[in-house]
Image (tube, helix red, strand yellow):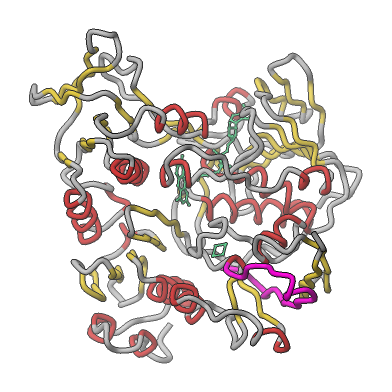
């Protein structure tokens, strides 16, 4: 537990780092807090970058916030090295930041395509507001976009690009979009919806290379079948890698991300970590997980601040995230891969439904919802309580949700 | 513009009154002032329900009724009660000067 003589340095001014700094003050910590971020912009919301066109910057907190909360905000500064033993950070301008506690929140970076032509002008990835501006600036009526990767970001960009009038093709190597993060029912309906909006979706198809147009920009995406898709712009959305180089060279234990415990502690005393760069335990599940979502980063921020200030640990969470595509508001809670059977509530083709994933004992382990906030909330609550449901009652959308619960069973 | 006062009551940290311009939402007023107990994960998108508040009985009838989406989220929200609202859906107006809300024990 720390007192106000302790200096806290938070590295990475994204969702996780900013939340750590804000929560420290919310809980009355009075010592110096410095938040260092590589991007030149004040901390902002990432989810709109793929969901709304134009790349507007939506700040996480108003400008006055940081001064009022006495959070020293250093922007446009990349931390190059960490001395974990002495809690010293080396910045790219050569200056040193000395503290007592370091919280790492460096996030993740888009994975790059390992094929010839992947670096041609006109080939984009999307993580930052600058990326979003560069990409959406190239989209518009008459432009054609190929999205490599049918994950959430790829599909969100596909929907945004259609709104901007672009021709869109999504190329996905697996047989289905969204891979293991979504069930077949949802993936198939989303695919149908995108197709109905004029997007071409090619699954089971790998990209062999990108070839230039006469002007030197990307001109086509070549598939492994040999087929060539002419295009003006490419977005590569094939997942993200944890930014764990700094942690690795500081000697922190890493394995597909910085390893942390349920309090956000790394293997080095004095260094905590949160967010997309970490792999962490989840209550009631074995193994460690790298969850890339705002709620997860926020949850870990709570864990770290509770540990630092000696507060009670936050209640075990049910992981969840959201996605918006066209007029579909998706909300997904739990981990889909753990289910054995599914129950559909609502009309799969009606644009408003929920898919509940149950384990062998009839407990809800995940729920995927489309325009169904009640089902989402109920599913999340049932997961937290370990409730057992009656599949037939749950499948009957005309019956109240509460009647799906087997009373007394937990 | 005249500032208006909003009071956030919190079981752990007591009551906090903030003064804000009467635009934006109750959630934004809380975030600006780093009020404990308002998380607002989705940034006001009516998705996360981590901006839940219990509105003081005296004020509940003076607020516009919730849209269906907000109503559905709140109906199944743990710890919700008869005056529960999502603070990101409560637009601030000069008429809300003096509004009192209570933050829940836990969010989300
Ligand atoms: C386009 C897009 C859409 C998304 N949509 C959703 C959504 O709808 N719902 C959802 O739940 N999640 C969504 N996510 C995921 C979500 O944004 C992340 O899970 C979240 O931002 C993780 O927070 P973080 O603090 O770990 O990382 P980030 O928010 O990425 O912040 C990390 C920061 O650290 C900085 N940094 C890195 N290295 C250094 C260094 N050496 N020195 C200083 N600073 C450094 C980076 O520049 C960055 O600003 C989306 C992500 C993207 C990219
Ligand atoms: S901030 Fe997410 S629902 Fe209000």
Place residue A326 in its image quadrant.
Answer: bottom left
- Horizontal arrangement in the rendering, residue A130 relative to residue A136 (left or right): right
Q: In front: A19, or A281?
A: A19
In this view, which residue lies farthest toward the right? Answer: A5
Relative vertical location of residue A100 with respect to residue B26 in this rendering, above or below: above
Q: Position of residue A177 (x, y in %)?
A: 23, 46
Residue at 45% in and 38% down: A54
Left or right of residue A405, residue B26 in this image: right
Tell me which corner region of the image, top left, top right, bottom left or bottom right, holds residue A168: top left
Rendering coords of residue A288 (x, y %): 47, 49
Magenta part, dominant SS = loop
Residue A50, by quadrant, is top left
Residue A199 % position (x, y): 20, 43
Is B98 inside the magenta-drawn segment? yes
| Rendered position, A68 above or below A228 | below
Please tell me which residue is depicted at 29% across the width and 55% down the height of the picture: A182
Name the one closer to the observer, A140 or A28.
A140
Percent of width and height locating residue A233: 30, 25
Residue A373 in view here: yes
Give me the residue at 22% from left, 14% from top: A211
Residue A267 can be seen in this image: no
Q: Looking at the image, which residue is at 77% across and 26% down?
A: A88
Left of A383 or right of it: where is B65?
A: right
Give the vertical position of B15 relative to A26 (above or below): below
Determine if the magenta segment contains residue A222. Answer: no
Region of the chain picked out in magenta, as a range: B89-108
Q: Quadrant of the C terminus of chain B?
A: bottom right
State the quadrant of the N terminus of chain B. Answer: bottom right
Given residues A2 and A46, the one toward you in this image is: A46
- Total residue callouts: 0
Check the image and name the residue furthest to the front: B1
Q: Nearer the viewer, residue A251 or A296?
A: A296
């Amino acid at each position: 537990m720390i007192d106000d003589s302790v200096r806290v340095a938070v590295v990475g001014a994204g969702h996780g780092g900013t939340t750590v700094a804000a929560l420290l003050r919310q809980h009355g910590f009075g010592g110096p807090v410095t938040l260092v971020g590589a991007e030149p912009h004040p901390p902002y919301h990432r989810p709109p970058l793929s969901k709304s066109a134009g790349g507007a910057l939506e700040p996480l907190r108003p400008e006055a916030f940081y001064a009022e909360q006495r959070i020293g905000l250093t922007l446009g500064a990349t931390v190059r090295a960490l001395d974990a033993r002495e809690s010293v950070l080396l910045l790219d301008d050569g200056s040193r930041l000395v503290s007592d506690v370091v919280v790492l929140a460096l996030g993740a970076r888009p994975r790059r395509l390992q094929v010839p032509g992947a670096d041609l002008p006109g080939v984009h990835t999307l993580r930052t507001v600058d990326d979003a501006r560069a990409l959406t600036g190239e989209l518009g009526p008459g432009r054609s976009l190929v999205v490599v990767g049918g994950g959430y970001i790829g599909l969100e960009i596909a929907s945004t690009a259609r709104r901007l009038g672009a021709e869109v093709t999504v190329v996905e190597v697996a047989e289905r979009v969204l891979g293991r993060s979504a069930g077949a029912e949802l993936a198939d309906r989303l695919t149908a919806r995108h197709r109905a909006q004029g997007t071409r979706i090619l699954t089971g198809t790998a990209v062999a290379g990108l070839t230039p147009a006469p002007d030197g920009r990307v001109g086509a995406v070549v598939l492994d079948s040999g087929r060539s898709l002419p295009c003006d712009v490419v977005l590569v959305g094939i997942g993200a890698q944890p930014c764990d180089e700094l942690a690795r060279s500081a000697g922190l234990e890493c394995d597909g991300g910085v390893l942390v415990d349920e309090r956000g502690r790394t293997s080095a005393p004095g260094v905590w970590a949160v967010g997309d760069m970490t792999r962490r335990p989840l209550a009631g599940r074995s193994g460690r997980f790298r969850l890339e979502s705002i709620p997860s980063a926020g949850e870990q921020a709570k864990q770290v601040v509770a540990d630092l200030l000696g507060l009670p640990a936050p209640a075990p969470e049910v992981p969840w995230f959201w996605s918006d595509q066209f007029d579909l508001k998706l909300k997904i809670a739990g981990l889909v891969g753990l289910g054995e059977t599914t129950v559909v509530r609502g009309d799969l083709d009606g644009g408003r439904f929920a898919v509940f994933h149950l384990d062998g004992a009839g407990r809800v382990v995940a729920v995927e919802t489309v325009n169904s906030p009640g089902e989402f909330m109920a599913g999340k609550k049932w997961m937290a309580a370990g409730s057992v449901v009656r599949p037939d009652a749950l499948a009957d959308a005309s019956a109240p949700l509460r009647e799906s619960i087997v009373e007394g069973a937990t | 513009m005249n500032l208006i006062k909003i009071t956030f009551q919190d079981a752990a940290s007591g009551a906090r009154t903030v003064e804000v311009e009467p635009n934006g939402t109750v959630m934004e007023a809380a975030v600006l002032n780093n009020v404990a107990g308002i998380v607002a994960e989705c940034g006001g998108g009516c998705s996360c329900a981590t901006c839940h508040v219990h509105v003081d009985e005296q004020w509940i009838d003076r607020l516009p009724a919730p849209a269906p989406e907000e109503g559905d989220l709140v109906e199944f929200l743990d710890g919700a009660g008869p005056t529960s609202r999502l603070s990101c859906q409560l637009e601030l107006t000069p008429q809300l000067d003096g509004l009192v809300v209570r933050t829940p024990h836990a969010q989300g």
